[in-house]
Amino acid sequence: MTMNALFQEFHVSRFARDRYQFDDFLFATNGEVIFANFHAARVFAQKMNARRDLVSFPEQAIRASQINALGLIHEVAHHLVRWYRQTKNPALLADMLSAFSAQVGAEAVDAMLRRFVGEFPPLAVYKREQTIDEYLAGATEGMPNRELLMEELLLLWLENSNPAFTPFQELFDDAALERDTTYAQVTAALPAFFAGQLRLGPGGGGGDDGSPVGAGTAISSGQTLLDLLLAPIRAHPHSLEGQLDYVRQSWGAVLGRYVYRVLGSLDMIHEEEKPLFFGGFDSASLPIPDFRHDPSVDAPENFTLDREWMPRVVMIAKNAYVWLDQLSKQYDRPIRTLADIPDEELDRYRSWGITGLWLIGLWERSEASKRIKQMMGNTDAVASAYSLYDYQIAAALGGEAACDDLRQRAWQRGIRLASDMVPNHVGIDGRWVVERPDFFVQSDFPPFPAYTFEGPNLSHDDRAGIYLEDHYFTKTDAAVVFKRVDQASGQASYIYHGNDGTSMPWNDTAQLNYLNPEVREQIIQTILHVARQFPIIRFDAAMTLAKKHFQRLWFPEPGTGGDIASRADFAMSKAQFDQLMPQEFWREVVDRAAVEAPDTLLLAEAFWLMESYFVRTLGMHRVYNSAFMHLLRDEENAKYRMLMKNTLEFDPEILKRYVNFMNNPDEKAAVEQFGKGDKYFGVLTVMLTLPGLPMFGHGQIEGYAEKYGMEYQRAYFHESPDQYLIERHEREIFPLTHKRYLFANVDHFLLYDFATTDGGVNENVYAYSNRHGEERGLVVYHNAYGTVRGWIRSSAAYMAREDGERALRQKTLGEGLELHGGDEFTIFRDHTAGLEFIRPSRELIERGLYVELGAYRCQVFLDFRQVQDDAQHSYRDLANYLSGRGVPSVEEAIQETFLRPIHQPLRALLHAELFGELNELVAAVGKQEHDPLAPEPAWADEVDELPGLADDLAETTELESVALADDEMMAEDDLVDALDERPTLHEEIEARLLALYGAVAA
């Protein structure tokens, strides 16, 4: 006989069994509860809750994790007693029986044991298949039952002494024993009895095979067995979780196989206590990657090379059904299929610089999803775009032929179509759910006993019945599974809904099981099928299929569960998991696509600090960068600049592969998050001028505020395009989309600190430069309220590859713009204002660029060129004269500077007072013309001669302008002669005007 063979688990009183009608399968032959798995604990808790008034007293609800913890603590206590008997005193229980019989008398002990069996009956006694006396006279696998009951008495006393067990005392209440027997005397003598037994030493024990397992041990030398059993209670008197954690940390060396049971029980507690989160991230909780402490740093670098067109993609998202509805209203005709989309719309997108069109919801959707949406109240809904029946273009959108038509017309305009691929789940009634149910994560029984499936059959296929859990319809629960019934055999299975562990399950989906190699291959074939139709593929929720997250969610390592309810039941060691899923699924996808669909841009929606891993190691071309939207929206500028700096120091290539956006289908509209003013346009400018892939949201350009649900087939808001917003896009934004080649890459990208005049760094200013060939661009944006002044000179550090080695480097603004020193001047244009600026190149190199920006103001400097100053120091004089101001044209300003000696006296002469008098003169002349009998004034001749003098002056000015534009058009001597005449003309005009003034005054 082995002591491990004995059923020694959790006793439940006859009273509790009668009240709650627990199923017999929950009990061992000795009457103790067997929690062989978490399902048994859930059944037990459900039985208790069914007899409680939880509507009036919700605080009385029993959690299965609490019941499981009770049973496990009891079971571990049995294990420690067993370990003590194996290592110290095999006759411990017989000694206890003898000692207490001697103390209170054999008859008293016998009466106590009889009452114990009556209060906590073994299964045969409870079912009246055996009498109490027969049980007491018998043995279990060679061990006398009377001796076994001494151990049960010890543990019963421990349970009633444990404050954390108090809410469940009705299950093991010892009040009757204490009242009617010598139980109180016996248990009071327990400390003295164990004090006389062999004491424990440090270390000691091990697993069932004698080997130490788990953490260290806190068994101190001289400790009694009773002290050891009481230690968790004393350490955490009111917490079951705390006691289990104490057991894990302190008794690891003697727990053996129970280590994993304890970890699983803690996971179950975490599952039930996990809060649900709804909505998106806020910037305060958004994690910022710190690659110094990121384990992915050690992962291999394996970027996938871009095709030439990929870095220049500017993408716009469109919910297919909603877009067709909006186009129908816009063009005042039915536009129902993809083939009906007007060429004018595609022409407009091309003129805007859009080169990628992401159509959301193209594939044939789940009929069950549509039915669920409509049953829940939205009678106008279609199925969710991410609950798919199969990867065929939806018939309602015109099918494959209509999609081919749109694809060809878009490509004629340089626009590539993009599509979703949803790899982690299919629709609840998807083709594979019917034909290949083995593809899915599932259970043979409902993970929670309270689940019922009495609702309508949602399947449209006679081969399988599909049943949603009933509490979804009453909105009182969100079940993690649905019921599938094989109609031929009647066999039921319970398939898990898709779930990322952050909120509720997606109740119209079925979760694929990636531990099945057939599933992995089938998904890869589906991806290649999509790639043959769409050169850009977006993978929905791709991070959930990374190995570490797929295991965390669905087959958690013991001690790491809790993200999806009931999945701690299916805990799996990392070694077991790696055997079933030996390599990263996404790496295999990328490698296969590189061979079979090499001209396909693979774009991953990935969060959870997985962004760099997805592009650098798994090889995706692009990955979502949700931090851009959240942090710039909330003006957490220091955080976002830190993210950029961390990325540049680790590997700038990652920055190039971010997908930046101001909204996406899961978030509020851009106008709701950023408004329509300078902040919106400033952030949008940054989005379009940073490396990476910029993505516009549906309705963003038009200023639409509606957030379109994935089940929408039309827009519900009656919104019209904001023409002012569109026109401002056309002035300020779309010229930049046509310059993506300048900003898309990271080879020459530099991020600068904005040094304030007091010596600090203003984190609210984004300043960066980039180059492509001979073109250079510098962007400065102030993402905050107020005015800032400062200098842009020194870049942030970035990782440079030099001779195969990685090194951190910094550059100055002058180096970033490739400026040369000496007497050269740098001229550049502000894209938004249209003004040109001139600075001494030496100043830009040595001091940097001085900038002043108001609230949410942005400047994009383009068209950088350097000029050598001439002998007359024209550029120097102009730069000094402008003192940092901009002008429409530097060259025209040079001409005006050349004419300044003439223009300034003339402006002084033609002042406001004189023009007032001349206006009266003109009025008098007009009166004279209308009165032929009036005498001609004495100054009339003066007026007649003024136009001729003005023409002479204009002619010399025009000659100068022509000569400045092309000095070959006029001989230098002729130009000098003409210019020499101008002072004389000025003097003559001045004299004539003064005489005229005098005449008028007279």
Image (cartoon, rainbow, N blue to C red):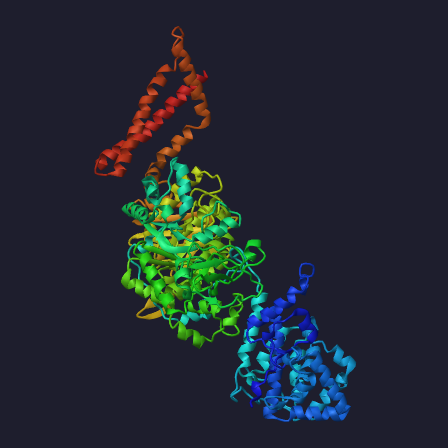
Q: Is residue 982 above or below residue 225?
A: above
Q: Is residue 129 above or below residue 104?
A: above
Q: Is residue 220 above or below residue 285?
A: below
Q: Quadrant of the N terminus?
A: bottom right
Find residue 566 and report its horizontal and vertical position in percent: 53, 67
Query: Number of labelled discs?
Result: 0
The outermost residue toward the top is 933
Between 968 and 988, the residue placed more toward the observer is 968
Find residue 266 and report its horizontal and vertical position in percent: 57, 73
Q: Is residue 70 left or right of residue 294?
A: right
Query: Could you say which quadrant of the image residue 476 lies in?
Result: bottom right
Q: Is residue 270 left or right of residue 439?
A: right
Find residue 831 and report its horizontal and vertical position in percent: 38, 45
- Residue lying at 75% horizontally and 77% vertically, measured from the top left: 175
Residue 163 in view in this figure: no
Between 630 and 426, the residue placed more toward the observer is 426
Q: Quadrant of the C terminus?
A: top left
Between 316 and 170, the residue placed more toward the observer is 170
- Residue lying at 37% horizontally and 63% vertically, measured from the top left: 615
Find residue 270 and report its horizontal and vertical position in percent: 57, 68
Query: Could you say which quadrant of the image residue 548 lies in?
Result: bottom left
